Image (cartoon, rainbow, N blue to C red):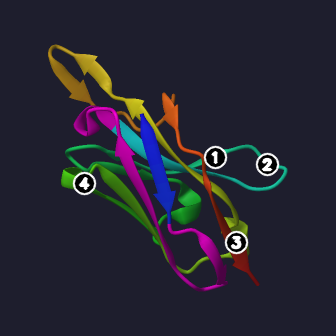
């Protein structure tokens, strides 16, 4: 399993960034893929999650209306479009994947709660 995260950097408050997470080594449509972040001195927190294949999404309250998660199933890639960035959005952003629940021959999406695989993370810094 591999993740290639890109798109991080430094931006002024109010600016935008687009993160990408290119995945390989697992069946994309059987997994939920999420973005998480960790600020200095704080625990890692969930930002957004998307169901591989059907595109169902979830967002943390703190980013609703500002961040958009999307995926390109053909490229096994998940994107996080971040707008109206705030200094509180600063942190290391991680991509993670969790296998969906499997019942009766089908996979079901329940969000990102117990990540199986993690990327190395990418720095996002929002200056005031």
Q: CA distance from mark 4 to mark 3?
A: 27 Å
Q: Tell me whether the residue at label 1 lies in contact with that at label 2, contact meaning CB atoms closer than 8 angstroms.
A: yes
Which residue position is annotated with label 1? 45
Q: CA distance from mark 1 to mark 4?
A: 26 Å
Tell whether 65 sits left or right of 63: left
Question: Which quarter of the image is occupied by the N terminus?
Answer: top left
Relative height, residue 48 to residue 118 (above, below): below
Which residue position is annotated with label 3? 125
Could you tell me which secondary element the residue under label 2 belongs to?
Answer: loop
Mark 2 closeness class: few <14, some 14–19, many ≥20 residues within 10 Å: few
Q: CA distance from mark 2 to mark 3?
A: 15 Å
Q: CA distance from mark 1 to mark 2?
A: 9 Å
Relative height, residue 33 to residue 105 (above, below): below
Relative height, residue 109 to residue 93 (above, below): above
Question: Which quarter of the image is occupied by the C terminus?
Answer: bottom right
The residue mark sitting in front, 4 or 2, is 4
Q: Tell me whether the residue at label 4 lies in contact with that at label 3, contact meaning CB atoms closer than 8 angstroms.
A: no
Nearer to the camera, 32 or 64: 32
Q: As drawn, which residue projects farthest toward the left? A: 105
For the point 18% across and 52% down, the residue is: 74
* Mark toward the start of the polypeptide (4 vs 2): 2
Q: Tell me whether the residue at label 2 lies in contact with that at label 3, contact meaning CB atoms closer than 8 angstroms.
A: no
Which residue position is annotated with label 4? 75
Magenta-highlighted residues: 7-31
Nearer to the camera, 61 or 13: 13
* Mark toward the start of the polypeptide (1 vs 4): 1
Residue 115 lies in magenta, yes or no? no
Q: Tell me whether the residue at label 1 lies in contact with that at label 3, contact meaning CB atoms closer than 8 angstroms.
A: no
For the point 27% across and 39% down, the residue is: 28
For the point 16% across and 13% down, the residue is: 104
Could you tell me which secondary element the residue under label 3 belongs to?
Answer: strand
Q: Give how far across and how far down residue 78 sits, in percent.
A: 36, 55
């Amino acid at each position: 399993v591999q993740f290639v995260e890109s798109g991080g950097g430094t931006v002024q408050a109010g600016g935008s960034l687009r993160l990408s997470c290119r995945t390989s080594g697992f069946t994309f449509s059987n997994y939920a893929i999420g973005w998480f972040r960790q600020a200095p001195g704080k625990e890692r927190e969930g930002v957004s999650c998307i169901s591989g294949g059907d595109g169902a999404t979830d967002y943390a309250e703190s980013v609703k209306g500002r961040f958009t998660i999307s995926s390109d199933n053909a490229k096994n890639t998940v994107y996080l479009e971040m707008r109206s960035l705030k200094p509180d959005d600063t942190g290391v952003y991680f991509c993670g994947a969790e296998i969906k629940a499997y019942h009766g021959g089908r996979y079901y999406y329940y969000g990102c709660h117990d990540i199986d695989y993690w990327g190395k993370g990418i720095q996002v810094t929002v200056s005031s």
